[in-house]
Image (spheres, coloured by chain):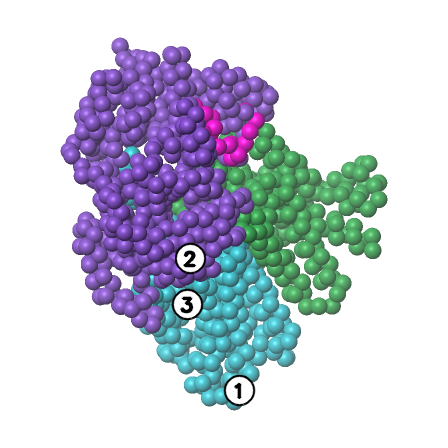
Chain colours: A cyan, B green, C purple
């Protein structure tokens, strides 16, 4: 099975290709809009002005990108190591619940203890959840795509059960948990936007992951395992252990994503609160070519699209699901291998060494 | 007791039909060497098309045809990116699923101004068939007779799939391409065309699966209606080692668990999320057992 | 009028001219050999003939008529058939199904299995190829699989048969059998073209020979008017210093000891069957044998990649059979794996990173989980100069290196670890003559320095050139052990086919 590894290309090429891909996607989207009888230009204009028009809208875009940064990083590190972790959504839900639980249970603690504790709990729960499919893959060679997808449903159903029965907030119609105490609520950065502390934490994670991938032995091991796991084994690298470590980190970051939403926006765990942040993480990681910096940029882009998209739906009558269609188009074009010099050369060299 | 058994048996057959169809689609693409993650998305598109067209035209049969066609077209896009533009198989498959989610929700809003679900009034579902002599047989009769016609077609397709794959030249070619692509190439087989054919077939079958989902069971379309069935179908393909009959039987196994959990929900007083987890957990267990079996065969 | 004429064929890949105005003429009903070392352009030329590549310049004439060959189907239609070096057979299909692939016997829209079996059986009998049409290809031995490949060509009524390195996977005896088949085909009127780098075979089998060097034709000769030296000179163009094994300096302690090894392959069958041997410091032990007799499983078991069913392994007196790969390396094991690009290197990573792959986790390359980039660069630079690896930039991906340089990277990395035992599996496969000799010289140097070397190779010439002691592996067991002075190609060939030395001895005495 192929892994999602990218051939080496110059940074300029990467940027140019990303821009072209974006342009094509926007074109496709415009086509879809026009064909369904709406005004594409107007929709796009609204999209961009509301996404980036004012300080407030920028803050909203950053807010929307926050969970995507976490899930994008979570997915990127797994993909880079050759592990198709599609289970970030599950870690997100479990982490969200863990954070909420800390927030409405440990009410006596002060904020500077409570918040880190909540994040830590979320990360640990998410990480441990990732260990299960990780173990299955590393030691039993069970394909991780199907298992992580299945476990997503399990996690979502389980947290749904938790919030509808044992931890249901009394007296409310909707399925949600009790509200977390004010000490656990993340401070807002730019009122009246909901942009909060989770965003800078996400940025820190980007840095941490960059450092991990480039400067640590674990980073080296996961890159080698992602490029060529057979070689890694022959060289003596502990590939199974690496897979476990990567799945833990990936789940950890997914859990943080959930914590960010609970502690920073909703202030409680709400059944089904995620519109698919985990899956968006896949788009983000792919567009960002499985690198921390790339994922950050892609997350910011999609955050802007999402934020703009909601408003676009309000003011025009173009549904925000169009954004999903755009995402799919982007993924298609990013993954298409436009044969380029380097690739041709490599293949040619391989052909020759066979003559 | 017998009544419960019959009920569960009937429900299993009914509910596994979309699984079996999608899994057959998975079989064809697996045999040609392409792991098809997009069964889910193609099923969803089919489900949507079935309801929309059936409601518009007033005929559920046309709806089924539309579903198959839409599944085929979705597979065409997938195949184009994977075979011609060399996109990574898994990534493109995920893209198809995301596209299906977005497009169906978008069209739902744009065409019908609704969110969440579309249940047109007077939408006639698929017709049921009673098998004349069979329904007199005790226990098995009421289990096997009285299903929608698509259910019977499905099992016919299982047989046809076996026939094609193991008794026709095309089937041999498909298996050759999947097992040793270079051998097929040097034998002069049109490899890309064969891969396209297999993917289109899987699209066609997944589209049919979607039709059974929306027209056969419920007569409505709801967002994300497929809800993971495409991946369950994939797990069945692994379990059945991409052979049509074992794969179909694996689907039945999964279906039993789903029928059981629905029954549990109705009869026992536990929060419904817990039994709902059952089918998904079973699949993880099944895949683990599969891998363990393979390891035991090859190692110590 | 010649049967085939390829005139002025040129094929350029980015950076390399694979074929440079090559002209090849083959007469009807002859066996023509195409020789050259690895990288000379032989396979490229044949692939053009078979329609897998398009030439950038030049024309092809069949029986005087100009033809275009855009794809393998066209080649097949023109009566050209090719038996590739790596067999193109579908394992789970039967012989009949493989032979008929693409042109199946039909009954309505179904496959007519009886007719397929009958037709294939008749064809096999006609040409004296002993094959069971109903057998599954996966169950057949390599020699028989090759016959199936030939049958495929005959089924398509190929008049021109191309064989690419046909004897690479055969024992000397199987090779003789193959030659008989080929001669019979020629006598029946077919034209044969075979690619090889084994000069002995050229002289034994062919009528005429064309020599390629670096993409150009350097000679076209009548076989019975030439000899090995002339062919070698045309192939290589200069005198190459051949690595010559001198008497072993001194043999020391056992570096590697293996006892009662039993290993299973992927299918659960026993591949290594109660194997025991020792490699001392200061000697090269060669494991000879036709591929598929357990060498791969042995290698993987010694490396730590494949679990043992039974048996013990000692390295420098330490038991290592329960240790993972990394700890075996730390105990002094060096590994040059069989597949350079898949197992030996990460082509996507930089040359530096490849060189660091065994040691990255220890000081000075890293400390407590943090890498030291400067130390890694320095380490890489040192190895590059020490082993004369031709690179323009150490941070470039390993994929840009030539085969020979890639192998140098692997060797450099392994030796930097200062192992007591080096296992080298097919170390010169796919390398040109210069690189091959360089690697062989290096292995001899290691031996003289006091390392133990276990050489696993299917290339008898290589084993004979390097090994002090030769063990022949057949069906997972050692059928015989021969000191280098006493070994001959013939003897080894017989052992590789399963004959035990005692019986050989008896035969010799009986003569």
**Label 2: how many Cα within 10 Å (few below 14, some 14–19, many 20+):** some
What residue does disc 2 label?
C314
| Secondary structure category for the residue under label 3 | helix
Discs 1 and 2 carry the same chain letter: no
The chain ID associated with circle 2 is: C
Mark closer to the observer (1, 2)? 2
Residue that protrudes farthest toward the left in the picture: C238
Residue located at (40% from left, 50% from top): C278
Q: Which residue is mark 3?
A: A70
Q: The disc numbered 1 marks a residue on which chain?
A: A
> What type of secondary structure mainly makes up the magenta span?
helix
Please tell me whether residue A242 is drawn above or below residue B186 in the rendered image: below
Q: Determine whether label 1 and label 2 are within 8 Å by CB.
A: no
Please determine if labels 1 and 3 lie on a single subunit: yes
As displayed, is residue A36 above or below residue A258? above
CA–CA distance in space, label 1 to label 3? 26 Å
Of residues B42 and C221, the one nearer the viewer is C221
Position of the C terminus of chain A, as image quadrant, is: top left
* Marks 1 and 3 in Cβ contact (< 8 Å): no
Label disc, if present, on residue A107 of the rendered structure: 1
Q: Residue at x 47, y 60 (%)?
A: C322
Q: Earlier in the sequence, mark 1 or mark 3?
A: 3
């Amino acid at each position: 099975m192929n892994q999602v590894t990218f051939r080496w290309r110059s940074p300029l090429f990467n940027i140019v290709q990303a821009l072209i891909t974006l342009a094509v996607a926007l074109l496709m989207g415009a086509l879809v809009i026009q064909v369904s009888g709406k005004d594409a230009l107007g929709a796009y204009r609204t999209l961009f002005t509301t996404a980036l028009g004012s300080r407030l809208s920028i803050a909203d875009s950053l807010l929307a990108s926050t969970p995507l940064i976490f899930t994008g990083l979570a997915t990127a590190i797994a993909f880079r190591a050759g592990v198709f972790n599609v289970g970030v959504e599950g870690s997100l839900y479990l982490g969200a619940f863990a954070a909420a639980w800390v927030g409405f249970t440990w009410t006596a603690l002060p904020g500077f203890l409570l918040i880190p504790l909540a994040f830590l709990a979320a990360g640990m729960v998410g990480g441990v959840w990732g260990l299960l499919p990780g173990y299955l893959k590393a030691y039993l060679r069970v394909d991780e795509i199907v298992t992580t997808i299945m476990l997503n449903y399990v996690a979502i159903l389980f947290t749904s059960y938790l919030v509808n029965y044992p931890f249901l907030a009394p007296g409310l119609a909707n399925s949600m948990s009790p509200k977390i105490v004010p000490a656990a609520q993340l401070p807002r950065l730019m009122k009246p936007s909901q942009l909060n502390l989770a965003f800078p934490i996400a940025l820190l994670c980007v840095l941490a992951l960059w450092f991990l991938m480039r400067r640590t032995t674990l980073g080296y091991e996961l890159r080698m395992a992602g490029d060529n796991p057979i070689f890694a084994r022959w060289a003596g690298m502990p590939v199974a252990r690496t897979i476990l470590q990567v799945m833990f980190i990936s789940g950890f970051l997914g859990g943080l994503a959930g914590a960010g939403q609970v502690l920073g926006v909703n202030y409680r765990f709400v059944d089904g609160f995620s519109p698919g942040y985990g899956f968006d993480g896949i788009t983000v990681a792919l567009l960002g070519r499985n690198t921390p910096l790339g994922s950050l940029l892609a997350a910011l882009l999609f955050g802007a699209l999402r934020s703009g998209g909601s408003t676009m739906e309000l003011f025009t009558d173009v549904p925000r699901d169009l954004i999903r269609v755009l995402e799919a188009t982007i993924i298609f074009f990013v993954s298409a291998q436009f044969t380029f010099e380097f690739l041709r050369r490599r293949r040619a060299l391989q052909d020759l060494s066979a003559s | 007791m017998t009544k419960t058994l019959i009920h569960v048996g009937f429900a299993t057959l009914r509910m596994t039909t979309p699984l079996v169809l999608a899994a057959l689609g998975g079989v064809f693409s697996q045999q040609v060497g392409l792991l098809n993650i997009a069964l889910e998305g193609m099923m969803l598109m089919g489900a949507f098309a079935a309801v929309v067209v059936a409601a518009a035209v007033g005929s559920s049969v046309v709806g089924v045809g539309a579903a198959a066609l839409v599944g085929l077209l979705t597979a065409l896009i997938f195949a184009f990116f994977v075979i011609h533009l060399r996109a990574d198989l898994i990534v493109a498959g995920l893209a198809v699923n995301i596209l299906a989610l977005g497009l169906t929700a978008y069209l739902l809003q744009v065409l019908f101004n609704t969110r969440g679900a579309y249940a047109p009034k007077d939408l006639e579902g698929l017709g049921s068939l009673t098998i004349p002599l069979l329904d007199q047989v005790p226990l098995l009769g009421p289990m096997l007779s009285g299903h929608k016609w698509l259910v019977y077609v499905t099992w016919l397709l299982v047989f046809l799939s076996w026939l094609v794959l193991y008794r026709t030249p095309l089937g041999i070619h498909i298996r050759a391409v999947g097992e040793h692509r270079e051998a097929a190439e040097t034998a002069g087989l049109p490899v890309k065309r064969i891969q396209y054919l297999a993917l289109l077939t899987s699209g066609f079958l997944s589209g049919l699966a979607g039709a059974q989902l929306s027209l056969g069971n419920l007569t409505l379309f709801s967002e994300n209606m497929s809800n993971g069935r495409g991946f369950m179908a994939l797990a069945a393909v692994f379990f059945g080692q991409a052979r049509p009959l074992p794969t179909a039987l694996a689907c039945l196994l999964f279906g039993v668990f789903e029928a059981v959990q629905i029954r549990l929900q109705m009869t026992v007083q536990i929060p419904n999320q817990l039994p709902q987890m059952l089918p998904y957990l079973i699949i993880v267990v099944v895949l683990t057992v599969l891998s363990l079996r393979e390891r035991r065969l090859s190692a110590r | 009028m010649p049967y085939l004429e390829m005139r002025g064929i040129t094929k350029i890949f980015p950076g390399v001219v694979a074929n440079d105005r090559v002209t090849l003429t083959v007469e009807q009903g002859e066996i023509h050999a195409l020789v050259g070392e690895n990288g000379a352009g032989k396979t490229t030329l044949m692939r053009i003939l078979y329609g897998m590549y398009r030439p950038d310049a030049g024309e092809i004439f069949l029986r005087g008529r100009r033809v275009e060959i855009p794809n393998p189907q066209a080649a097949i239609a023109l009566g050209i058939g090719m038996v590739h070096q790596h067999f193109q057979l579908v394992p789970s299909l039967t012989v009949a199904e493989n032979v008929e692939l693409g042109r199946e016997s039909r009954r309505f829209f179904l496959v007519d299995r009886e007719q397929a079996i009958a037709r294939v059986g008749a064809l096999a009998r006609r040409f004296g190829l002993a094959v069971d049409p109903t057998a599954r290809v996966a169950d057949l031995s390599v020699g028989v699989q090759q016959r199936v490949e030939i049958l495929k060509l005959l089924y398509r009524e190929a008049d021109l048969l191309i064989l690419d390195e046909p004897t690479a996977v055969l024992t000397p005896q199987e090779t003789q059998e193959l030659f008989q088949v080929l001669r019979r085909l020629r006598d029946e009127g077919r034209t044969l073209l075979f690619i090889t780098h084994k000069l002995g075979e050229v002289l034994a089998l062919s009528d005429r020979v064309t020599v390629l060097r670096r993409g150009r034709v350097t000679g076209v000769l009548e076989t019975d008017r030439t000899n090995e030296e002339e062919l070698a000179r045309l192939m290589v163009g200069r005198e190459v210093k051949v690595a010559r094994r001198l008497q072993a300096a001194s043999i020391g302690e056992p570096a590697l000891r293996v006892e009662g090894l039993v290993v299973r392959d992927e299918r659960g069958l026993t591949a290594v069957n109660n194997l025991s041997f020792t490699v001392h410091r200061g000697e090269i032990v060669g494991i000879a044998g036709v591929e598929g007799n357990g060498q791969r499983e042995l290698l993987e078991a010694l490396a730590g990649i494949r679990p043992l069913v039974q048996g013990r392994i000692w390295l420098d007196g330490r038991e290592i059979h329960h240790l993972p790969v990394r700890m075996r390396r730390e105990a002094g094991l060096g590994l040059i794996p069989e597949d350079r690009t898949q197992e030996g290197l990460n082509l996507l990573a930089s040359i530096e990173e490849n060189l660091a792959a065994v040691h990255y986790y220890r000081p000075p390359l890293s400390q407590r989980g943090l890498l030291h980039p400067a130390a890694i660069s320095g380490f890489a630079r040192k190895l590059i100069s020490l082993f004369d690896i031709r690179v323009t930039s150490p941070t470039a991906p390993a994929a840009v290196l030539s085969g020979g340089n890639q192998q140098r990277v692997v060797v450099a990395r392994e030796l930097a670890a200062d192992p007591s035992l080096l296992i080298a599996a097919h170390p010169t496969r796919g390398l040109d003559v210069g690189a091959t000799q360089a690697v062989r010289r290096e292995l001899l140097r290691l031996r003289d320095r006091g390392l133990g070397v276990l050489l696993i190779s299917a290339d008898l010439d290589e084993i004979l050139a390097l090994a002090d002691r030769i063990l022949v592996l057949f069906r997972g067991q050692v059928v015989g052990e021969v000191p280098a002075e006493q070994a001959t190609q013939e003897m080894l060939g017989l052992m590789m086919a399963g004959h035990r030395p005692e019986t050989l001895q008896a035969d010799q005495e009986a003569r």
